[in-house]
Amino acid sequence: MKTTSPVTILIAGIGATVITLAQNWKLSGFIFILIAGILFPLTASGVFTFQITQLLIYAIAIAGLNLLTGFNGQFSLGHSAFYAIGAYVSAILMTQFDMPFYLTIPFAAAVCFVFGFLFGLPALRLEGIYLALATFALAIATPQILKFKPIEHLTGGVQGLALFHMKPEAPFGLPLDQDQWTFYVTFAVTILMFFLAFSLVNSRSGRAMKAIRDNQIAAKVTGINLSLFKTLTFGVSALFTGVAGSLSALLIAFVAPDSFQITLAVAIFVGMVVGGVGWIPGAFLGALFILFVPNIAEHIAFGLAAFSDFVRGFIPFFPTIGEQSSKGLTGTVYGVFLILLIYVMPSGLAGLLRLAVQRLAQARG
Amino acid sequence: MTIKKYGMVPALALGFAVAMAGSASAQTPGVTDKEIKIGNINPYSGPASAYGTIGKSIAAYFKMVNAEGGIHGRMVNFISYDDSYSPPKALEQTRKLVEQDNVLLVFQPLGTPGNTAIQGYLNGKKVPQLFVATGATKWGDPKKFPWTMGWQPNYQSEGRIYADYILKNYPNAKIGILYQNDDYGKDYVKGLKDGLGAKAKTMIVSEQPYEVADPTVDSQIIALKASGADVFFNASTPKFAAQSIKKMAEIGWKPAHFLNQVSNSVGGVLKPAGFENAEGIFSTGYLKDQNDPQWKDDPGMKKWFAFMDKYYPEGDKTSSFNVYGYTVAQNLHKVLLAAGKNLTREGVMKAAANMKDLELDLLLPGIKVNTSPTDFYPIEQNQMMRFKGGKWEFFGPIISGEVRGS
Amino acid sequence: MEQVVQQIVGGLATGAIYACIALAIVMIYQAIDHLNFAQGEMAMFSTYIAWQLMQWGMPYWGAFFLTIAISFVLGYAIERAVFKPVHNAPVLSHIVIFIALFVIINSMAGFIWEFTIKPFPTPFGTKPVLGGGILSAHGAGMIAVTGIMLVLLYLFFRFTRIGLAMRAASANPDSARLVGIRVGFMNALGWGMAAAIGAVAGIMIAPVVFLEPNMMVTILLYGFAGAVVGGLTSPGGAVFGGFAVGVIENLASLIPHFGAEMKLTIALALIILVLTLKPNGLFGRKIVSRV
């Protein structure tokens, strides 16, 4: 009898794995992402790790909004409220109750779910633009509520809560700095949340959510409990965004009313539309946009003065843009970017991809 | 303990660089033989973009410094990023400045929330967070935050100055307060109340907060008048200050009016509100006002106008922010000169903590910059003044602030 | 009690501001079936145009009417240039374009005119006319102007062919097209009119709040609130809603201990309450959709 050498077993094992992976592109994609995620902070600079961590956090928040809008047809321009609640729940539990950060995430999730569910109740009666406005109002009121006097001892009022000295270090003596460890925590939570999101939209409940989005009355006729599903979806959506907020408290190590202004709600909304409504992976593209495009716009705006001087070399009556005041055009450049993007991709990146797939199918067929 | 990435390679590289250059400054981030990199964050977009002109005037100031030969032969490379007044963005941009651009120091980051968000990071990295642009009291705490220093007189000290004046001159006053419902407004109210001491409870008859989001403060002014107040303490930002001055004239409410120095700009508040309505207002100051005719022939002011014409021609000459930006930039200029040829982060902090009776072009006569290793409050002096006939009239002694730490 | 009366009258004066902008919001909603988040910024920009014209020496009323004309053209042009190319895009993409316009106009105004507040003249004067100065002549004038605009709009939508065509084009574009209405042109016209009304609102509001690039940001929100409370399909309701929001907000500030601090939150909560009870606003008509 021949004994199989360990090398043979190893080769056979690898071979079997490769074949399994080749057959299952979802699994191999997942493993690729996992490896990339583990290697990333070991090779990237601290500030880049910080930015990508922020990107993952935004992606979770955008995915949360997408569950509500893209899969259930309900608007929200107020998700900054749930992001803020998530961040504050974590910060308060850490500062007032000395709870370790990791334990605060489920609390943040639960509290946001309850708030989202409760807000979903009046939202039941509102449709389209009215719901958009009601949620917009929520986002406007959030910073004011956060500094409300009777809860000042918890929230720190306008000063907010600083958590610099509470950032957890990597456990078990792992040779990782805080940036790297924060990334790994966020990465793990991101994988969990997106796994949940994918599972949800492909489940029975997910189909019910989509049926409501496509036609409420028809969905009702097939026996779907409209109120229950809509409010539950609001809760789940808030839960996702709240988890993102909680992670942001870890990353920024500071929460204050000024961090959760209406601009945050608008950013999450823009991220969802840009990434693609009703397409979960689009959340990453949307996050990429809201994180980096303002920085790009800023650089372009700063360079506009030189540009105008250059053009004036050819066209004498071209308006001068002062070197200093060009900085004020950051918003203009960002806005122009947004409009161009909608021109090119009216339905966001998801629409563009769908179009590409269609064309491809046509070419084959 | 955090463990540094790539422990060996940079250490070797650094050792090599030191050996090659042979000068101490080669080790200091942001400093070469030809250049000093200074970082800054300012809101150039978003709801607070009105403050953006501070960053722009500072950039223009260093353009002037460079045109005149730089600092000890080095050109200043002033890198300013937009944080849209959002604390998370402030932290991201600050990290870019420190880790990517390798700036020597972060100068004049604006706003209390943004500065709080970056304070832990900068002190952890031992990067100077110099002359922060906020009047909160918490920026001079060298024991806890040896790398953070404020600049302008703090709001609480100013509130106390008014309290002292009111106690002396209006001992039976009924005080009404208008304040912005945030850290800035509340600091002023705290300063006033602390100054009034035990009498605060009986003297203050009405406190009216407003939100930045409020369109007007008309209803607050109406309520204040109805409260019967005969002394009015106004802790509001320029737009709301102008609205209140105008509304008071409209409804014929004429209390003794104490206006915070945030909003005492002649061109930016009092002229739009109407000089006749602003007559008799009390305030305090530490900077000369470019639209006040008494400084027309002042040499410092002439320099400022020449500077604006040449280096920031599109800038707004009625905006007090441009005077502020020029003055604080001049202060940093002097600190960097004092820190000497051999620039290090420690050296800059040392120079900043050892300013003795420093005078700047646009500080009011008699007001000087003073710091020590235990005193991280550069400007603590104020001068009481009263608005008369289109200009500020100064009276009384130069008053030193007494509120420190939070 | 005296204080309550004062706050109500004061609330009516600020309410006039909200009513003014709420009217412009309803106008554009009638014309394009959308809320325009950039409406306030357009009004602010128009007000700067009027200010600039007056700086150049034009008399008040000349600048007033010329600004209305310019704003109409600009509104029309924005629709043609920015929205026509993407009119088939989903509603959410349109909202993103509104956000983009908001940011662009706001930053351009700051770039051109800087941020220092500017006084804006009033043709009515500032003398007190009521209740010891609580309502100023300008406040009364603003209420009157809002009333006049309301009547004109009512007549326009009710009795002119073009007004009817515009309503049809917005309410049911496909059927409107079938009866020969040029829907795209009607939309652009609606934009122009909304911009013109916004200009009037801005010019009326600026003397009270001072002219600066951010002057309309929060006023627009209150305007939305007013329009929604009154019903987005009813110009009269919007005006009522605007006044109601002004008064409610001021009365909320009288609640002891936390009223003054939380008046915005209270006002917003009330609006959500109204909407839950009457989803189409107090005076809006119900829109029935069929499967």
Image: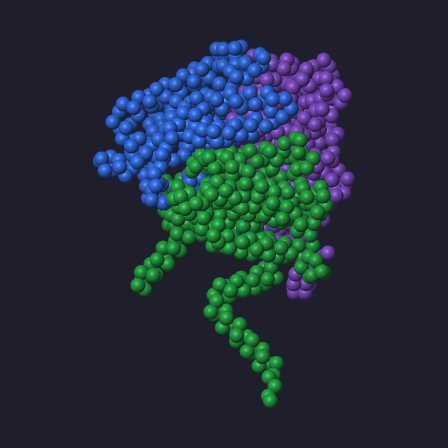
**Above or below, A275 relative to C207:** below
Q: Is residue C93 above or below residue C271?
A: below
Residue B100 in the image, given as x and y percentages of width and height: 59, 54
Image point (60%, 22%), residue name: C255
* Residue A62 drawn at (x, y percent): 51, 48
- Relative depth, front residue between B28 and B235: B235
The residue depicted at 31 percent of the width and 30 percent of the height is C167
Does residue B243 sit above or below C1 in this rendering?
Answer: below
Quadrant assignment, res A185 = bottom right
Residue lying at the far left of the rendered structure: C180
Can residue A180 be seen in this snapshot? Answer: yes
Does residue A99 appear to the left or right of B272 in the view shown?
right
Quadrant of the rendered image containing residue B62: top right
Location of the N terminus of chain B (image quadrant): bottom right
Count of all numbered marks drawn on residues in the image: 0
What percent of the width, then of the height, locates residue B293? 57, 23
Q: Is residue A352 left or right of residue C251?
A: left
Letter of the chain in blue: C
Q: Is residue A24 left or right of residue A365?
A: right
Pick the quarter of the image with the C terminus of chain B: top right
What's the colour of chain B in the image? purple
The one of C129 and B288 positioned closer to us in this rendering: C129
* Residue C219 visible somewhere in the drawing: no
Residue located at (69% from left, 54% from top) = A169
Q: Colour of chain A?
A: green
Given the current orientation, which residue lies at the most extreme bottom position? A1
- Which residue does the image show at 56% across and 15% down from the upper left? C4
Q: Nearer the viewer, residue A220 or B358?
A: A220
